[in-house]
Image: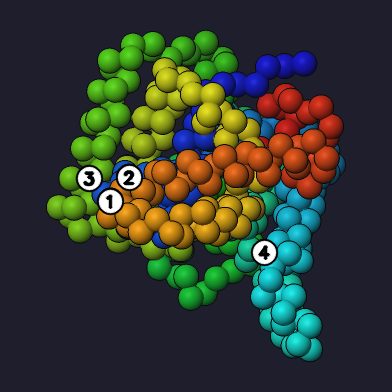
Amino acid sequence: MKERIRWIDNAKGICVFCVLLAHCKLHHPYIQMVYTPFFLTMFFFLSGYLYRCRTFKEDIFKLTRTLIIPYFLLCFLILFIGKDNWESVLNGNFELVAHRTLRILYGYDLWFVSCLIAVQLYYILLYHVYMKNLKYKILTAIALLPSVYLIKNTDSQMMPYYCDIALFALSFFISGNVFKELTSRYKIKTYSNSAIGIAILLCYIFIALVMQLNLDMEFHFAYNYYSSPAFFIILSLLGMFTIYIISNLFPLSFLEKIGRNSLVFFAFNGKALALTMLLFRHINSIYDCQYLSAFIICIVQSFILLGFSKIINTYVPFLIGKQKNENSTFKSTSL
């Protein structure tokens, strides 16, 4: 059985933790400026890195088993355990449940998962039509980058499975696949110098803060909002390169465990946040230093979600598109 790729789990863990920070209710604008440009695009990049096409039939089957079925199972499970949904039904009001069911069917819930479904479907179709050649993959990835100008600031016109955002995200997905092919073909190795790695990280943080503060920029990948799409692409690429370097140089088992269970974190981070805030409800000092508190809350939230992950992986792995005793990177979902 093939070993998992540690830097990928580490990179996914960093990005998942950034997702928790993004959903945290505490104010941390400067930290947000650092992770916002890359934490979602990096997920698509890593998903593309892990993706391997086979026959068209096998690819569609894999997409269905690892993403489509888990998407519906998780969405309806979350719908089923929602207290407000139960209260609505018991009071004879089915409107709320009907509305949320429609959202699920149209792919509006679990943003990243539903968007990744569209991205992988696009990739499968393009791959089997013309994109088996590396050159065509590179050209397609570059050609798709300007699609950000077509979708930006259109949140009021949300499309099923975020298929508009998926066009832009597909560029990063293909880039990940191309990167894997190039590193495998030319045996490219990461430069293993910790000091240079830290210097790259500090340079990225400096550039991200200076650009966003001085040029008054704001980015929200999931909401199609880019005050400057070109600068977003530049910062995103710089951020992804930085995370690639850091993930190779400084592996952390805690982050790797998070990265191996990213789908559970995506699905249940809201429930875990509610439990975490319940634990801290009597600690008023948590709001005195919101930057530090945001990290503390997300760490506690991570341990809760790792507990959820252990239960799901042990008893109901099909819920997240896995099979029993599935430990290989290549047999698990691209999440």
Disc 3 crowd, CA 10 A, few/some/many (<14, 14-19, 20+): some
Of pointers 2 and 4, the one earlier in the residue sequence: 4
- Crowd band around label 2 with a 10 angstrom C-alpha radius: few (<14), some (14–19), many (20+): few
Which residue matches tag 3?
209
Asked whether the residues under the numbered discs 2 and 1 touch, taking CB atoms below 8 Å apart as contact, a structural biologist would say yes
Measuring 62% from the left and 39% from the top, which residue is drawn there?
306
Camera-nearest residue between 266 and 37 = 266
Q: Nearer the viewer, mark 2 or mark 4?
A: 2
The residue at which mark 1 appears reads as 289
Quarter residue 142 falls in = top left
Residue 111 found in image quarter: bottom right
Residue hosting label 2: 292
166 relative to 231 in the view: left or right: right
Q: Position of residue 330 (x, y in %)?
A: 71, 27
Q: Earlier in the sequence, mark 3 or mark 1?
A: 3
Q: In the rendered view, tell whether residue 175 sits above or below residue 35.
A: above
